């Protein structure tokens, strides 16, 4: 029997935590629910998860601190934040930390499930695609970017975005098309999120001056590769 993917859910709202736990279990996930950041910290240090769902505001250790520990323990573990609708600064902070997604309260469990599925959709597809861009090797199936003996583990969303740019290298992609493909919808605030990810990818690729992610004003984004 195939083992269920294990998810860590950290949510101090008693009712919401119970609803999400039951809903995700109904959809074939193994869910561990923690009510506080301190409890979750102990789990993170001793367990591994396919995905972590972190409420930003928690008693004790907050969601951002938990995310830092997740990244230090295993940088490839995807995580998403649950945040209050009026805390957009928290969303930007979370994305800069490497969060794969966020969802604002209140929300329907179905929306959370779709976001989880989008993050994990390639986990079992057996893809073994390795791309060469300049001096870099990009292993999409493992979310890894390598230059010589230096290796960087990407988040799932970073990998999705980089693959889209590579598949369309030296071609300008409309911002709206990138957002719909990688984020699922074209939205102004998601556009801010995309800019954060573009900035990170630029830094990752800066070691090879033959590669550049160009912003074409009023049009979109292009991965320029001079081979």
Image (spheres, helix red, strand yellow):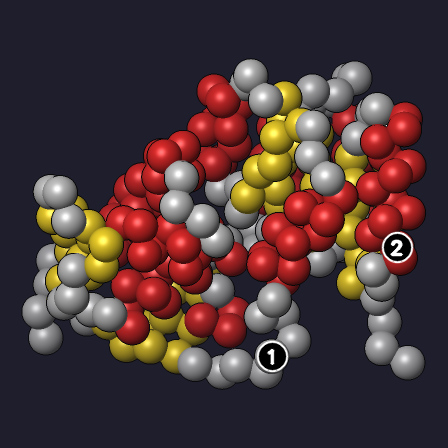
- Of residue 154 and residue 16, the one placed in the foreground of this image is 16
Q: Write the residue at 29% across / 73% down.
A: 167
Residue 48, percent from left and from top: 76, 54
2 or 1: tag closer to the N-terminus = 2
Q: Residue at x 22, y 59 (%)?
A: 173
Q: Dot 2: within a 10 Å radius of its alpha carbon, few (fewer than 14), some, or many (20 or more) residues?
A: some
Quarter-wise, where is residue 177 in the image? bottom left
Q: Nearer the viewer, residue 163 or 22?
A: 22
Confirm whether residue 180 shows in the render.
yes
Left or right: where 24 falls relative to 121: right
**Res 129 quadrant in image:** bottom left
Instruction: Identify the disc placed on residue 217.
Output: none
Give the CA distance from mark 2 to mark 1.
Answer: 22 Å
Q: Secondary structure at mark 1?
A: loop
Residue at 51 percent across and 57 percent down: it is 156
Q: Mark 1, residues whose alpha carbon is within 10 Å: few (<14), some, or many (≥20)?
A: few
Q: Is residue 126 left or right of residue 53?
A: left
Q: Quadrant of the C terminus?
A: bottom left
User: Quadrant of the image for the N terminus?
Assistant: bottom right
Residues at discs 2 and 1 in contact (Cβ within 8 Å): no
| Up/down of 197 relative to 104, above or below | below
**Residue 190 shown left or right of residue 102 in the figure:** left
Q: Which mark is residue 25?
A: 2
* Horizontal and vertical percent position of residue 12: 83, 25
Please tell me which residue lies in front, 171 or 31: 171
Residue denoted by label 1: 125
């Amino acid at each position: 029997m195939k083992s269920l993917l294990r998810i860590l859910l950290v949510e101090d709202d008693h009712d919401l935590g119970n609803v999400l736990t039951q809903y995700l279990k109904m959809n074939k996930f193994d869910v561990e629910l923690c009510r506080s950041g301190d409890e979750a910290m102990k789990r993170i240090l001793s367990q591994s998860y396919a995905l972590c769902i972190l409420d930003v505001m928690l008693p004790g250790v907050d969601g951002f601190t938990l995310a830092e520990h997740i990244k230090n323990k295993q940088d490839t573990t995807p995580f998403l934040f649950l945040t209050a609708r009026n805390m957009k600064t928290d969303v930007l902070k979370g994305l800069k930390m490497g969060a794969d997604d966020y969802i604002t309260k209140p929300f329907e469990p179905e929306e959370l499930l779709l976001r989880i599925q989008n993050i994990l959709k390639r986990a079992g597809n057996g893809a073994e695609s390795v791309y060469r861009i300049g001096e870099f090797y990009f292993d999409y199936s493992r979310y890894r970017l390598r230059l010589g003996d230096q290796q960087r583990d990407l988040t799932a969303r970073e990998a999705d975005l980089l693959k889209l740019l590579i598949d369309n290298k030296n071609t300008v992609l409309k911002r709206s098309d990138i957002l719909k493909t990688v984020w699922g919808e074209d939205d102004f605030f998601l556009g801010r999120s995309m800019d954060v990810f573009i900035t990170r990818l630029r830094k990752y690729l800066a070691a090879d001056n033959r590669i550049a992610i160009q912003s074409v004003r009023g049009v979109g984004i292009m991965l320029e590769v001079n081979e």
